[in-house]
Amino acid sequence: KNLLEDLYRSLGFEETELDEYLNKHSRISIITWACNLNLFNCRDQALKAVRSWLSNGTKIAINLEVPIMCGAMQLAPVDDWKMLYAKYESIPDGERKWKLLTGLGCTSHKMFLEK
């Protein structure tokens, strides 16, 4: 946990233009693990990022879309899941649609997975 915490705190949650290649790719794994283990308010940060993207188009770094969507949906309230699902249904097929579906599949609400 300490190693993960050190990396999470040093890399941060958001990508910057000055990030080196290794840091960008390390952040993907760090966010994935932190959210899966429910550490460091990762899920809250992820949900905040997704809500901001859905409501006003605030960008999420392309390589962080899957870990952030997944982290956000793990314990997201029903309304947030439904908003992301509506976004999924509204966009044409492509990579972003796949990323949204991956994030939606991370929900702990089993009733949604039966759709």
Image (cartoon, rainbow, N blue to C red):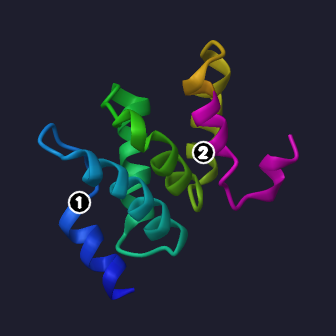
What segment is highlighted magenta in the picture? 98-115
Dot 2: what SS?
Answer: helix
Marks 2, 1: nearer the viewer: 1
- Vertical arrangement, residue 44 with respect to residue 112, above or below: below
Q: Secondary structure at mark 1?
A: loop
Q: Is residue 108 left or right of residue 26?
A: right
Depth check, front residue: 2 or 84: 2
Residue at x-position 64% and y-position 38%: 82
For image coordinates 49% across by 51% down, the residue present is 67
- Residue at point 52%, 75% (across, down): 37
Q: What secondary structure do most residues of the magenta stretch adopt?
A: helix
Question: Mark 1: few, some, or many residues within 10 Å (few <14, many ≥20)?
Answer: some
The residue depicted at 88 percent of the width and 47 percent of the height is 114
- The residue at which mark 2 appears reads as 103
Residue 97 inside the magenta-drawn segment:
no
Task: Pick whichever, 104 or 112, lies toward us.
Answer: 104
Identify the mark at residue 91; answer none if there is no mark.
none
Residue sitting farthest toward the front: 22
Residue 43 lies, in percent from the top left, at 45, 62
Image position, residue 5 (x, y; %):
31, 78
Q: Which residue is mark 1?
A: 12
Q: How many marks?
A: 2
Q: In this rendering, would 36 be left or right of 25?
A: right
Q: Is residue 46 left or right of residue 82?
A: left
State which quarter of the image contains the C terminus. top right
Position of the N terminus, as image quadrant, is bottom left
Looking at the rendered structure, the kind of residue marked 1 is: Gly
Query: Please, which residue is most extreme toward the left here?
Result: 18
Asked where in the image residue 4 lies, by quadrant, the reply is bottom left
Residue type, mark 2 in image = Gly
Up/down of 2 relative to 102, above or below = below
